[in-house]
Image (spheres, grey):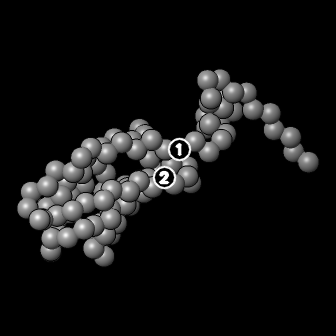
């Protein structure tokens, strides 16, 4: 049986540098910039994500990109946008609800 001892300092493990606990990945998104049917979302997150963010634009379109992310819709309407960020196997999802048009 292996026994591992971890020393924690200010919430960080001195053994591997992780938090050794599931901590939410901070994602901050600004209000979307809307120009007709094109939406641009800017924001900020952790300094070292595993890769680009996974975007679902709510109209059947999915892609990956970092901030800022843009998408052009074909039609006005209500859309549920999600973005997923991963780091060290942990995934955090944020939701944004958007109404385009009148």
Q: Is residue 26 left or right of residue 43?
A: right
* x, y percent for residue 10: 61, 23
Query: Residue sitting at 33 percent across and 56 percent down?
Result: 96
Q: Please name whichever residue, 45 or 73, is drawn nearer the observer in this view of the structure.
A: 73
Q: Please name whichever residue, 75 or 42, is drawn nearer the observer in this view of the structure.
A: 75
Q: Residue furthest left?
A: 36
Specify the quadrant of the image occupied by residue 75: bottom left
Q: Quadrant of the C terminus?
A: bottom left
Q: Which residue is mark 1?
A: 24
Query: Residue sitting at 80 percent across and 33 percent down?
Result: 5
Specify the quadrant of the image occupied by residue 26: top left
Question: Which mark is first along the chain, 2 or 1?
Answer: 1
Q: Is residue 92 left or right of residue 32?
A: right
Q: Is residue 60 above or below residue 84?
A: below
Specify the quadrant of the image occupied by residue 12: top right
Q: Is residue 44 above or below residue 59?
A: above
Q: Residue furthest top?
A: 9
* x, y percent for residue 61: 29, 72
Secondary element at tag 2: strand
Q: Is residue 90 left or right of residue 100?
A: right
Q: Is residue 46 above or below residue 92?
A: above
Q: Is residue 36 left or right of residue 10?
A: left
Mark 2 surroundings within 10 Å by alpha-carbon count, few (fewer than 14), some (14 through 19), many (20 or more): some
Q: Which residue is mark 2?
A: 92
The reply to whether the C-beta atoms of the residues labelled 1 and 2 are less than 8 Å apart is yes
Residue 48 visible (yes or no): no
Q: Please name whichever residue, 36 or 49, is drawn nearer the observer in this view of the structure.
A: 36
Secondary element at tag 1: loop
């Amino acid at each position: 049986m292996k026994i591992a001892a971890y020393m924690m300092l200010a919430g960080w493990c001195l053994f591997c540098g992780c938090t050794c606990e599931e901590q939410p990945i901070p994602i901050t998104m600004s209000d979307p910039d809307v120009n007709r049917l094109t939406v641009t979302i800017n924001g900020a997150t952790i300094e070292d994500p595993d890769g680009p963010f996974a975007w679902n634009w709510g109209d059947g379109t999915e892609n990956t990109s970092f901030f800022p992310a843009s998408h052009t819709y074909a039609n006005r309407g209500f859309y549920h946008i999600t973005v997923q960020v991963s780091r060290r196997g942990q995934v955090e999802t944020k939701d944004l609800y958007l109404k385009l048009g009148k």
